[in-house]
Amino acid sequence: MLCIGALSGASGQVSLKEPAYAADKGADELVLKNPAGDTLLAYRYTVKPPPPGVDGVYGRSGYIHPLKTLSGHVLTCIQPADHYHHYGIWNPWTRVAYKGKVYDLWNIGDKQGTVRFVKFADIFQNEHGAGFEAVHDHVVFEDGREIPIIREHWRIAISQLDANRYQCDIRSTFAPVGAADVTLQTYRYGGLVFRATEAWTNANSDVLTSSGKNRDDADGSSERWAIVSGNLGEEQGGILFLSYPENYNFPEPVRVWPADANDGRGDQFFNFSPTKNKDWVLHNGKTYTLRYRLVVFDGVLSREEAEQLWETFAAANQDDAANY
């Protein structure tokens, strides 16, 4: 890696320093870049309006798009016409019980709730990586009011592994707001989710999980990791999703769209869904954490490499991993 030299005082000694990653905050987005200056991902912190003619309730903040490979291929999409509430990489809950009522914070078109960006608790950049910690409020709509019921800290940290791969650590720490418990009820999707580029269909993309399943039989299986990959023009690439062993309901159930999804197109959608097969009660006064690592790659990634990367992630000190 290229080093930058600088003179240090009267001694004339040269101080060598690794080129730094960057976290550049713009008017709407915070962009994370590697030392070469390549944009790897953007986090949207202002509300992105929906396309013209679509109900404004579909606008959202607090998501990642674009997520790119090191060669510049975009892997995410937002606001597709088939699901205007899909936003690249985001993390809402679908069936949320609070004070005797159940709300849907995923399907925001139903106008029951949403997730709001509140502020940045941290933005960091150095020679080891870059990232941020965003504060999100998960809110419900009640009698014309927005009521926060979960406060979340979403910490994202990137670092490059080699010429073709980098990792993106995601740490979600959250707790109920106020005096009431919150129950994340059983539903087939909810939590960390990825809506892939619209270029991926059942003809040019696939899924491989830690238990050896593909998109024909992966939905509902419990997994430690999953690879979602496909053709990117004349090249290939994808994401390895890793779940941490201390996560709730680990190994985690997954939601994977079948090959005939969206009227036979077979668009790619992947979700680690810890509440897919059982409730999760969030008790007032307690804090909960979910940790994930995304390994974004150009080319291909083998099952053996995926297993090794998961073992490294599982053994890591996670408090250090997201702080650089």
Image (cartoon, rainbow, N blue to C red):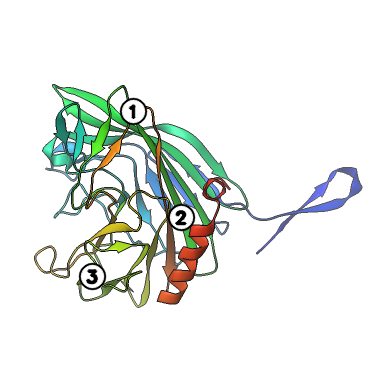
The answer to whether one can see residue 25 in this image is: no
> For the point 34% across and 62% down, which residue is it?
75
Give the quarter of the figure containing the N terminus: bottom right
> Disc 1 marks which amino acid?
Asn
Label 3 or label 1, whichever lies nearer to me, is 1
Q: How dense is the environment of label 2, judged by Cα within 10 Å: few (below 14), some, or many (20 and up)?
A: many
What residue is shown with label 1? Answer: 284
- Dot 2 and dot 1 residues touching (CB under 8 Å): no
> Disc 3 marks which amino acid?
Arg
x, y percent for residue 280: 27, 42
Nearer to us in this view, 229 or 163: 229
Check disc 1 and report its element: helix, strand or loop.
loop
Label 3 or label 2, whichever lies nearer to me, is 3
x, y percent for residue 66: 36, 54
The answer to whether one can see residue 290 in this image is: yes
> Disc 2 marks which amino acid?
Cys
Check disc 3 and report its element: helix, strand or loop.
loop
- Residue 146 occupies which quadrant of the picture? top left
> For the point 63% across and 52% down, which residue is it?
127
Nearer to us in this view, 277 or 120: 277
114 relative to 212, above or below = above
Residue 83 lies left or right of residue 4; in this view the side is: left
Q: Distance between the residues labelled 3 and 2?
A: 23 Å
Q: How far apart are marks 2 and 1 (CA)?
A: 30 Å
What residue is shown with label 3? Answer: 215
x, y percent for residue 231: 31, 74
What residue is shown with label 2? Answer: 168
Residue 143 lies left or right of residue 229; in this view the side is: left
x, y percent for residue 266: 17, 68
